[in-house]
């Protein structure tokens, strides 16, 4: 009996690997095209680190006219959560990193290299495990969990490396005949890789992000097929990345230490290894100390958080590219209105130690992104968010014609308003434009410099009676405020007041503040002229009257 006979005994129904090599041929892509993927496990909510990785993978594939696909690695089925796959696929779609191929939100496949779910590829893995056994590069292991635990205890006591290797790999030396007898007798077994490595030898490897790294060679006889017939991650991803014709594996740097094993598996099975790029984790500043962004500690670590608070996906992608490549910020400064897909992203310019995630900076980016939206876009996106998370805002936006006027204030010009960072900010930013909200709230009129009631009443009364006209253009409107200021003993120009402050009670800016506060209850708003145009003279007069009676 030889290795091939043993392989036939263990996997009698497995196809020859030539079937799969033919079924999944080399992709017909141009030279230099990158094929990459994300391969998460459906064991919880999608992490921002997963979106970060997906964005990078999709970006490098797109830039080379390559392919980006989503593979679900669900061989650890005990930890799988309900709707885990759908959650991953939906998160990718939400953040604009939808794969070209792979598992979809409705748990189906898109593409010709599937199934894109590992639990559906059992026959494929067994075919390649059978091939390894027939080559004498894998073997059945009959050690029980109790025997493995006893071995670990002995290794600990002897203060030697833990694992199944060398003299500790006792099933490695079982003859083909003895292994066959055990299998025929019904003994349970797993399949292990027969590593040709030695720990005292080194391998050198070039990682696209980390650069040149040196490791001890792998000498562990790792499990490749578990007792349930499903593969371990190590073996499955080797087979999958080969058959799906992955050229670049972009993954978290926690897998960097597995490179010697993975390269060894590729070599021993006879596959060409892909290039590896290990991404440092997203970090957070925690009271002066840097730590990993944590699902347990940080709400912003969950991809769902951004939908809940209403930060646009475009802002998230823009920010993630910002922290991924240090050159992005200068590029954006020089290309203010360019699509982010025009940015020339480089894997080898990524941080080796981990980019720092800053919610304040993200919201600043988001303000800029939203400032470029049209009133229609702001309306639609706000309404879509409100339907899910804020019934009151949804009711406010029921009058679309009026809402578009409100959202149109200071939008579409050279310096658009930047007061909205997320859709959950919208209600607070526009509620003063709605009479029922404005009158339903007790206003704290902080007029700042001009505080005498007689002065305030005089400004408000004279302005509405003598100076305001709905038909005025902006320059005429502002000239009239200057005229009002001059007629009441205030400087028409701020510079006049600064040159001779004792000659005036205050200046035109202080008069404008009185108008603004009486009108909105706020000292800081978008353009007051545009606000007045939307409200109209009658509503302005009523607000001034209420302010004078407050």
Image (tube, grey):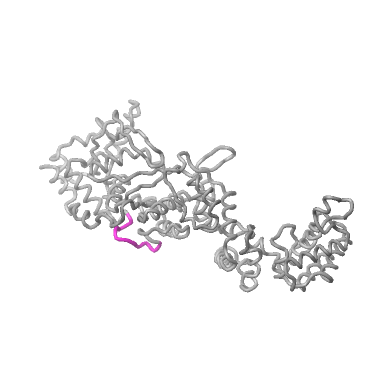
- Residue 263 location (% of width, % of height): 29, 41
Front in this rendered view, residue 365 or 400: 365
- The residue at the far left in this view is 1
Judged left or right of residue 92, residue 476 is: right
Name the dominant secondary structure of the magenta segment.
loop
Q: Is residue 307 visible?
A: no
Q: Which stretch appears magenta? A: 105-117
**Which residue is at 78% across, 68% downward?**
543
- Residue 407 location (% of width, % of height): 63, 66
Judged left or right of residue 422, residue 232 is: left
Q: Is residue 219 visible?
A: yes
**Which residue is at 15% across, 46% downward?**
184
Residue 380 colored in magenta in the image: no
257 above or below 422? above
Q: How many marks?
A: 0
Quarter of the image with the C terminus in it: bottom right
489 above or below 192? below
- Residue 384 location (% of width, % of height): 55, 66
Quarter of the image with the N terminus in it: top left
Residue 108 colored in magenta in the image: yes
Judged left or right of residue 529, residue 377 is: left
357 above or below 536? above
- Residue 178 location (% of width, % of height): 14, 39
């Amino acid at each position: 009996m030889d290795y091939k006979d043993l392989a036939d005994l263990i996997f009698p129904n497995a196809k020859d690997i030539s079937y799969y090599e033919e079924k999944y041929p080399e992709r017909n892509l141009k030279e230099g095209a990158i094929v990459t993927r994300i391969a998460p496990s459906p064991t919880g909510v999608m992490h921002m680190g997963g979106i970060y990785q997906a964005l990078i993978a999709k970006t490098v594939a797109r830039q080379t006219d390559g392919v980006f696909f989503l593979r679900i690695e669900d061989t650890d089925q005990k930890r799988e959560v309900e709707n885990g796959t759908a959650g991953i696929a939906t998160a990718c779609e939400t953040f604009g990193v939808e794969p070209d191929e792979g598992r979809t939100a409705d748990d189906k496949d898109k593409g010709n290299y599937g199934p894109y779910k590992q639990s559906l590829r059992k026959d494929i893995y067994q075919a390649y495990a059978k091939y390894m056994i027939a080559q004498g590069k894998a073997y059945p292991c009959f050690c029980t969990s109790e025997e493995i635990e006893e071995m670990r205890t002995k290794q600990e006591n002897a203060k030697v490396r833990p694992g199944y290797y060398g003299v500790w790999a006792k099933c490695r030396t079982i003859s083909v005949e003895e292994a066959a007898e055990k299998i025929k007798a019904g003994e349970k077994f797993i399949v292990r890789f027969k590593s040709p490595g030695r720990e005292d030898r080194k391998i050198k490897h070039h990682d696209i992000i980390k650069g040149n790294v040196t490791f001890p060679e792998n000498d562990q006889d790792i499990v490749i097929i578990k007792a349930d017939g499903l593969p371990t991650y190590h073996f499955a991803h080797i087979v999958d990345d080969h058959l799906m014709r992955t050229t670049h594996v972009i993954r978290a740097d926690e897998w960097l230490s597995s490179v010697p094993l993975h390269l060894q598996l590729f070599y021993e099975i006879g596959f060409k290894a892909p290039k590896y790029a290990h991404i440092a984790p997203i970090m957070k500043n925690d009271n002066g100390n840097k730590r990993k962004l944590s699902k347990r500690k940080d709400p912003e670590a969950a991809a769902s958080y951004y939908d809940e608070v209403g930060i646009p996906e475009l802002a998230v992608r823009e920010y993630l590219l910002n922290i991924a490549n240090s050159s992005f910020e200068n590029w954006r400064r020089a290309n203010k209105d360019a699509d982010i897909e025009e940015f020339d992203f480089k894997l080898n310019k990524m941080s080796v130690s981990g980019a720092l995630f800053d919610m304040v900076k993200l919201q600043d980016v988001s303000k800029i992104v939203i400032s470029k939206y049209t009133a229609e876009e702001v309306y639609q996106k706000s309404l879509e968010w409100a339907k899910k998370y804020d019934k009151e805002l949804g009711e406010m936006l029921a009058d679309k014609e009026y809402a578009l006027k409100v959202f149109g204030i200071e939008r579409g010009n050279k310096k658009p308003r930047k007061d909205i960072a997320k859709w959950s900010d919208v209600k607070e930013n526009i509620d003063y434009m709605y009479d029922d909200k404005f009158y339903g709230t007790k206003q704290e009129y902080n007029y700042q410099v001009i505080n005498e009631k007689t002065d305030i009443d005089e400004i408000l009364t004279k302005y509405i009676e003598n100076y305001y006209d709905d038909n005025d253009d902006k320059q005429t409107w502002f000239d009239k405020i200057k005229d009002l200021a001059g007629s009441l003993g205030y400087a028409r120009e701020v510079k006049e007041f600064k040159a001779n402050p004792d000659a005036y009670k205050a200046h035109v800016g202080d008069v404008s503040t009185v108008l603004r506060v009486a009108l909105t209850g706020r000292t800081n708003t978008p353009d007051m002229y545009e606000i007045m145009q939307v409200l109209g003279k009658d509503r302005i007069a009523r607000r001034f009257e209420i302010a004078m009676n407050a």
